[in-house]
Image (tube, rainbow, N blue to C red):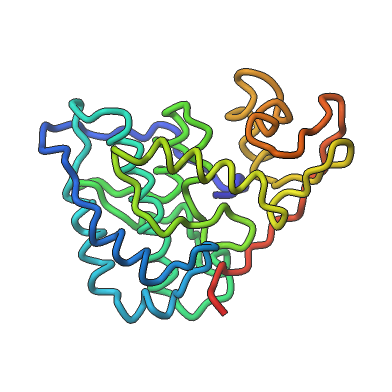
Amino acid sequence: MELDVEIQDDVQTDYVTINPLLDHSTWDALLKKYVADNGDVDYKGFKNDIQKLNTYVTYLASQIPAESWSINEQLAYFINVYNANTIKLIADNYPTKRIKDINNPWIKNRLKIGDKDYSLADIENGILRKMNEPRIHFAINCASFSCPKLLNTAYTADNVQDLMERATIEFINNSNKNKLTTNAPKISEIFKWYKSDFTENGSVIDYINRYATIKISADTKIHYIDYNWNLNEQN
């Protein structure tokens, strides 16, 4: 998720025609069992239930995106691919204190779609960010305290727009992630790392103010909160 790594920006997905009606029920059940409403994750529970998680990840790998898929089907699929494989990465290396303690967590090839290898960075930067939807940054989770929370509902073609909107509103207005004031705001470094994604139609402040309950003055200097990479784990 961070930008101090080399990113492959030429990721291509092979397209074949398959049934786009994906079944995310296994993932939804796992999320409801092991993710709290505040986004804290029971990684020990996921590790103990790794067979079900692996089954879902393998299922996703077999569902190669097709040209016939709608934008919502693609968004839901790749968000779930990212989140499920991030949880698997932590579970496979648990116990660990931080995702950054794992060797090359975002770059090393760790997942498959069809017969092709992808890194988490490939999914985020090479696919999701190229879909011109900034709200994906609040839908994907990097297993860390400062990340947007992991929702305990699987993304689907039917709910992806509503869930991305909810995730964006909740993250921006969460005082643990952003300290919003009119004239002295401190905001997440996500808005610095991915600034170009949030400024196609205005400034970062303009984007935040679309969702914020406390509006930031347009000419205010932005300060950033140091990112806390500690695991977003249930106590």
Identify whether 88 is placed above or below 169: below
Q: Position of residue 100 (x, y in %)?
A: 57, 64
At a point 36% along the width and 58% down the height, the residue shown is 84
Identify whether 40 is placed above or below 8: below
Looking at the image, the residue that sits furthest to the front is 213
Across the whole image, how many numbered discs are drawn on residues?
A: 0
Looking at the image, the residue that sits furthest to the left is 18
At a point 82% along the width and 37% down the height, the residue shown is 222
Horizontally, is 54 left or right of 168 in the view?
left
Horizontally, is 84 left or right of 213 in the view?
left
Q: Position of residue 32 (x, y in %)?
A: 37, 65
Q: Which quarter of the figure is the C terminus placed in? A: bottom right
Q: Position of residue 189 (x, y in %)?
A: 69, 46
Identify whether 226 is placed above or below 166: below
Q: Position of residue 185 (x, y in %)?
A: 82, 42
At a point 48% along the width and 60% down the height, the residue shown is 105
Q: Nearer the viewer, residue 78 or 184?
A: 184
